[in-house]
Image (tube, grey):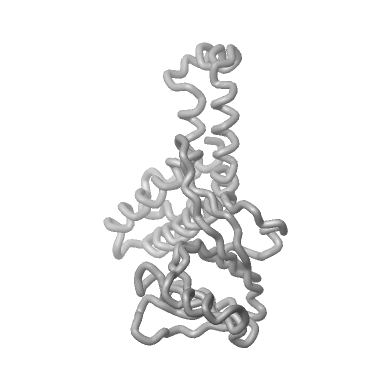
Amino acid sequence: HRIFLRELETYVEYPELVGRCFLDQMEDFQIYEKYCQNKPRSESLWRQFSDSVFFQECQRKLDHKLSLDSYLLKPVQRITKYQLLLKEMLKYSKNCEGAEDLQEALTSILGILKAVNDSMHQIAITGYDGNLNELGKLLMQGSFSVWTDHKKGHTKVKDLARFKPMQRHLFLHEKAVLFCKKREENGEGYEKAPSYSYKHSLNMAAVGITENVKGDAKKFEIWYNAREEVYIIQAPTPEVKATWVNEIRKVLT
């Protein structure tokens, strides 16, 4: 209201240049990630105290039609609306002066949305006894079928592992990749969001990758300690596989 809105208003006559306004404030947009991470906490606090006289009195004094929780949801909705707005503006600004800025602003907002989405999954990891922040930036997260093929261990277990995949949710950080098991929760709103119980992790310093596994365009291998442990990973689509392989390559190089 005090900063961004005022800047936007200066572009009323030149809407195609509004991309610059977004780019100037892009650093401040990072606050949305923190806000969304705290959303489950604010929701549970609201559920505990929504009946309190204090909140009812505030609503009455301010003459608000809606209760506080509706306003707390606004920023979450707004960050997704910005990207729709920028996409629409780009449609009509193909060859005009501000088109490049609009495109850059859209790319940056989509990056923030991805970071928000990834971090919402990351805060749902349970059972990891270290500090996740020490693993560096979270680059990717997603669900996969995983087969293991380890040198050590009983042969029968090894043979069995070849056929039956485990469903695992992977979190790729700059310094490690985490394997978790997804658990669906029963509840409402954010409480219905899944949680991920931590199973194990691999230090990226000792990881290798095989991009293609014979007979399946969706599979790739992550191996550890000179193939002492091998994980065959099947992505939901070849496109998802390509994105992950590229991102892992970047980390390794």
User: Could you tell me which residue is drawn at 57 percent across and 43 percent down?
Assistant: 35
In which image quadrant can residue 37 be found? top right
Q: Position of residue 45 (x, y in %)?
A: 60, 29
Query: In the drawing, does residue 128 fall left or right of residue 149?
Result: right
Determine the residue located farthest toward the left in the rendered image: 92
**Visible residue check, residue 114:** yes
Q: Quadrant of residue 218?
A: bottom left
Q: Position of residue 249 (x, y in %)?
A: 53, 80
Up-down relation of residue 96 to residue 80 (above or below): below
Q: Position of residue 38 (x, y in %)?
A: 59, 41
Most foreground residue, 65 or 237: 237
Nearer the observer, 62 or 21: 62
Query: Would you say 54 lies left or right of 189 here?
Result: right
Q: What residue is at 50 percent from the left and 28 percent from the top? A: 69
Q: Position of residue 172 (x, y in %)?
A: 56, 67
Judge by depth and name the residue closer to the eye, 211 or 90.
211
Q: If the image is split into quadrants, where does the C terminus sit?
A: bottom right
Residue 248 versus residue 89 in the image, above or below: below
